[in-house]
Amino acid sequence: MAIYDFFVSRNGAAANAAAYVGHVGRLFYDSTNGVIKLSDGVTPGGTFIPYNIASNVTVGGIKAGPGANVSTDGTLTINTAGLPLSFGNLSVNDNILSTVNANADLVLQSNGTGNVELVGNVSFYSTAQGHTGTPFFHVQGDGQATFLVPASDPLAGAFKIVGSSTGSVSAPLNTGVMLQLTGNNNDASRFYNDAIGSFAAFVGRRINGTVASPTAVTAGQEIIRISATGYNGTSIPTSAGARINFAAAENYTTANFGSNIGFWACPTGSNVLVKQATIDGQSGLTVTMATVTGNLTVGNIAVSGSGTITTPRVVFNDGGIRSIQSGIYANISFATDSIVHLYQPSGDVNVNLSGYTAGAIVRLMINMAAARAVNLGVTATNSTNGSTQLAAAKISNNQAVQIIYTCIDGTSANCHAALSYA
């Protein structure tokens, strides 16, 4: 090992520090940048002078650590691939950006009118699950979105759209709420489904079993329910005040889709739903109670219960023969009816005449399961028993009654009733 003294002098060599070799053991520097190099008599440009590594008590050179790269010209670059990195209160580990402090918010904030923009697939995960699990919200790069809600909650819907700055909602109370809409105060809450160039559809599909192992819908099961309820002064009840049910009428197969639509409503003064009408592909419309105030044009009609039909004119297009099941109203039109059959009325019978046509004759046949009075619908002087009523006392159980109505001149005043019963 040798000890060298050094002095500075201009040696007149060409000013090309990168090619200069120099003399063994001597130092030289380029006046352009002042960088001192050590000559070994062989290496063009010399070598850098080694320094002691700095410590907390010693001034020296800085040792390049993992990810820190120093090029031959002294340029320092940082490559953090696979290495943790902290800056400010944020930490980067591999491709994960997180906060250093526990429970601190991570905020991405744009400046002014700038946007925070995400490009590519975007996923959101629960805190407990972490990003290696299944995302509860995921948006594909092409815009398709998937929203997962693993557990039902009677106090919160899966997805809420709230028309206010407070986000206040009324709790659903029932489980299974997937979408809850809350409108702005004092404004209607509307749901629009606009189809451009085709139809708009609201489709409800029922699948028994599971998605992975589906089974068929069976007879009597509801497929869709549309309900309406209102605040009662204390709370919003879990039961409806009115409802429309779409249900299966038979076990579903690839060839059998029998179904019916039920209309339910609560009578005034009651909180119990009552089925008022049913529509199906077998019997058509079956009405428990009905009031018709306009013109009604039908083919065949069956009325059950204590329904009331009020109409200026009822036109039947079945050749003038029709049957009424267990009703209490026999509405007869001289213009269209020839035979009207009332089977086992549920109470006293009321005959209503209309469509007065000169010379028209209509036969009313009544099969009594119990003794019922018949209000004839004509004056006492126009009835063969001299009364406006055929009294129940005159009729026995399981007795057939026939009343023949004749309209003389097309007026109600000259309509007569001839009674035949035994």
Image (cartoon, rainbow, N blue to C red):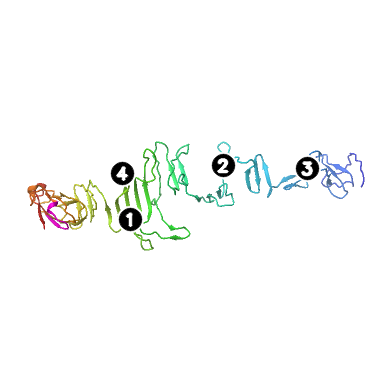
Which of 215/75 is in front? 215
Query: Which comes sooner in the sequence, label 2 or label 4?
Result: 2
Label 2: element kind: loop
Q: Mark 3 — residue? A: 62
Q: Distance between the residues labelled 1 and 2?
A: 51 Å
On the image, the x and y values in percent for residue 420 come to 10, 56
Question: From the viewer's perspective, is 121 left or right of 86?
Answer: left
Tell me if mark 1 has few (under 14), some (14-19) or many (20+) residues whose alpha carbon lies within 10 angstroms of its own.
Answer: many
Q: Which of marks 1 and 2 is in front?
A: 1
Label 4: element kind: loop
Q: Distance between the residues labelled 3 and 4?
A: 87 Å
Q: What stretch is highlighted in magenta?
A: 392-403
Q: Which amino acid does label 1 sit on?
A: Asn
Query: Does 134 sit above or below residue 37?
Result: below
Which of 119/280 is in front? 280
Q: Residue at x 29, y 59 (%)?
A: 282
